Amino acid sequence: MQFTCKTVALHGVDARPVEVQCQVARGLHQLNIVGLPDKAVRESKERISAAFYANSIALPPMKILFNLSPADIPKFGNHYDLPMAIALLVNLELLPSDEISRFFAMGALALDGKIEPVNGVLATAIEAKAQESGLICPIDNASEAELVGEIALLAPPTLLSLIKHFKGKPITMQSNRHKAIAAPIFRTDMSLIKGLEMPRRALEIAAAGRHHLFMVGPPGAGKSLLSSAIPSIMPPMNAAEILETTLVHSAAGLVKQDGPVLNRPYYDPHHTASAAAIVGGGQGAGPGEISLAHHGVLFLDELPEFKRDVLESLRQPLETGEILIARANAHLSYPAKFLLVAAANPCNCGMMFEPSTACNRAPLCGEKYMERLSGPLLDRFSLRIMVPATDAISLGKLQEGESSEKVRNRVMSARKMQYARNGNSICNEDLDSGALDAQMRQSGSGAQAVLEKASQRFSLSPRGYYRMIKTARTIADLSGAEVITAEHIAETALYRMMEGSRLNYDVNKRLASV
């Protein structure tokens, strides 16, 4: 007798249909798995045998063969346990073949028959819905499967409960589909940031247009504090963004217990992290930090301390919004549309601009330190600002800054203008050169003159030129203006404090030159 249960092979954030074919035939008792299984899949036979024994289900004294078709696709992971067990139970006439055939299945088995959570359930639910099928998955993965909308979903806690379901004792599930979403809790509110008016303004512009931000300042000036406040002023994620972000986290196995990703992610990897950890790869070519930060914030503290290959690998995803991982046994694509916030000291000791504490190698030490960052990488930062040191005594006397809620309201208003003008979920950072040229044609001659002068003053590349227009467009959106004016271009020039490895913090002088 033979029966086929539908499941998937996970390929990054995609799910490829796989048929688990089970044949029970005459011969000496043995249980084999074929179809390019890896070690975890081959070990499934031991888990299936133990789960059957724990639930008093006798294996037939016959030859049992599982074929994972198509046989030329490598099969990885433990999610094949449940579909293989289901296919065998159908052969043993403990499950109805006609009803099971309408479902995809995935899940791991414990030795006592408990169905344990696995990676990639959301991608499988999307594929099952596309094929007008239902899904059988672990109960701990049910909340992410519900994100795809109306789908026939079974989430049994154990193998025995699945059998009882089709014997007349239905599985009762408490749906989270209409459960109220709790208000997000942010680690830092903007009200805690005292003074630092220019950095606060740069954060607001970065959040409104999703512009990448680079901050340079002495140790303890507040760069990390500023970065941690960005999620609190960003707009809430919409349904499509929640689905995309959860899809990546599901592929990485981070949704099993935490549930869907409802708030914008924030990741801050250490500067010793490898290229595989940041951009993805490693065993199984999984997603990296830049993909886990999709639709959220990636903070790289002490940017010059990161390895050169790690920094250069960021250049492509910053432009395209996705990362392509090519390995000998895998060629995968992950989404990576994130807001990059980076911070650095001006030099090794960080005191280059403090005459009383600076080393005797200043300013050469600062130039050498910043030379670790390539020009093409710096060119991708639309906002480059200084975070000045603040006297600790005077800081305690300052009043609290404007709250995140007030700033977020302005950011959301600016986003609404962008979406109405650019299209749904298209920020100013995502605009192409044609759309930006059209924006400048609508502006007055004064704005064009200031932009040309700034381009000459800073020796801007075409990328830098268009990034200035993107930033100016966001500043205009924050002010509610329909067209870009000379004042918007002039303010944009404030946020170009670094060109190449040269540092210049005399903001007033730079603005006057424009």
Image (cartoon, rainbow, N blue to C red):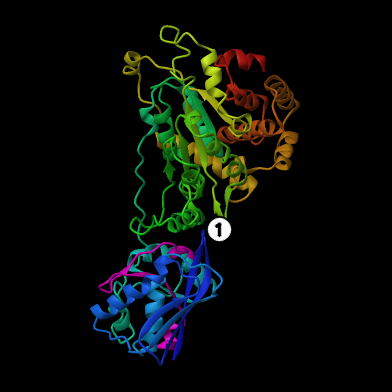
Q: Secondary structure at mark 1?
A: strand
Q: Is 7 one of the magenta-colored residues?
A: no
Q: Is 116 one of the magenta-colored residues?
A: yes
User: Does residue 160 show up?
Assistant: yes
Residue 164 relative to residue 88: left or right? left
Quadrant assignment, res 364: top right
The residue that label 1 is drawn on is: 330
Q: Taking 355 as reference, is 472 above or below it?
A: below
Tell me the amino acid under the disc marked 1: Ala
Q: Image quadrant for the C terminus?
A: top right
| Magenta highlight range | 96-123
Residue 11, percent across and down? 52, 62
Residue 380, percent across and down? 60, 34
Q: Residue at the spot x=44%, y=36% of the render?
A: 230
User: Does residue 137 show up?
Assistant: no
Q: Taking 442 as reference, is 498 above or below it?
A: above
Residue 426 relative to residue 90: left or right? right
Residue 327, percent across and down? 56, 54
Q: Image quadrant for the N terminus?
A: bottom left
Residue 94, percent across and down? 34, 88
Residue 460 relative to residue 261: left or right? right
